[in-house]
Amino acid sequence: ILKIFNYIIVLLYILIFFLYLHKFYIMNFNLSFKLNHHIYLKDPESSELGKQIVKQGIELIYNIGFEQFNFKKLALEIQSTEATIYRYFENKHKLLLYIFNWYWNYISFLLEYKLQNVTDPKTKLNVILDLLTQDLPNNEGQFEYNKFMLNQIVINESSKVYLIKDIDAFNKDDVFRPYKELCNKVAEILLECNPNYQYSKSMSSTLIETAHYQNFFATHLPSLTDVADHKSKIYVRLFLRDMIQSVIFH
């Protein structure tokens, strides 16, 4: 009996080790997504310099904000020239759009990973709420994008990607596909929870945008929220959960 018990303990340790290794591998290798070619002039993923432009662009936008950000400042950060950056991106809005597309691809990747073997719709919704309201796992490889900064940029600057004059032209080029695909995934899960709900796509995009706006308001304009003594991310999760309960599970 003792031998059997020891054998089981060893198997459990091996299982835990491989689960940890699998998680470490999934969360720590450098992800690469093939993004819409209308966003860039030269694919940043095609060179180390291109990856540095995006990586340092993320850090600079996070530190000084999109309004103060320009390619001259970015060139100083990467110790190169503005002309070099313009070979990759037509303007700073295209760079921001690239960053957002990468981010939404990454969120979709995480969602698929976390929903593996999850069958309960309510559990799936909780996974979505966690993704929308918690800090993302971060790595600091040479070309690894800072996920915390990415998340903050999306919270602070998201409206500047699509509340623009040329939105229809951009949409024709299908540059918002990653965001639309994520919204569709969330909408499908909402329908799993309530097949009779008529506004799953509207609720899906509302959930995602509300997570951003309420997080921003709770941090910078708290009187527009009910954040009270909660931390902003905890408050946003509670608010989103209450909204879902009221609308989907009423």
Image (cartoon, rainbow, N blue to C red):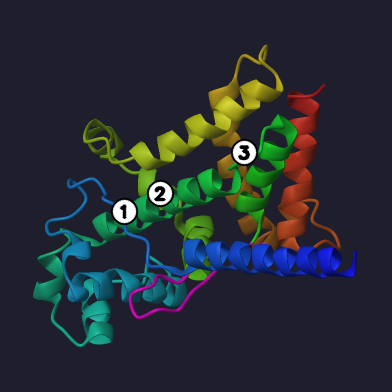
For the point 54% across and 46% down, which residue is it?
Answer: 111
Q: Quadrant of the N terminus?
A: bottom right
The answer to whether residue 222 is seen in the rendering is no
Magenta residues (range):
135-146
Q: Position of residue 47 (x, y in %)?
A: 17, 70
Q: Which residue is mark 3?
A: 207
In this view, the residue farthest toward the right is: 1
Taking depth in this image into account, of 73 and 238 the one nearest to the observer is 238
In-front residue for pair 105/118: 118
Drawn side of residue 246 relative to residue 137, left or right? right
The residues bearing labels 2 and 1 have C-alpha atoms spaced at a distance of 7 Å
- Reply yes or no: does residue 183 show up in magenta: no
Q: Identity of the amino acid at label 2?
A: Asn
Element class at badge 1: loop
Label 2 – label 3 distance at C-alpha = 17 Å
Query: Is residue 194 rendered to the left or right of residue 72?
Result: right
The residue at 26%/78% (across/down) is 74
Residue 105 image label: 2
Residue 52 vs 183, above or below: the answer is below
Dot 2 crowding, Cα within 10 Å, few <14, some 14–19, many 20+: many
Contact? badges 2 and 1 (CB < 8 Å) = yes
Residue identifier under label 1: 33
- Given the image, on which type of amino acid does mark 1 rest? Phe
Residue 241 in the image: state x and y as whole percent. 76, 40
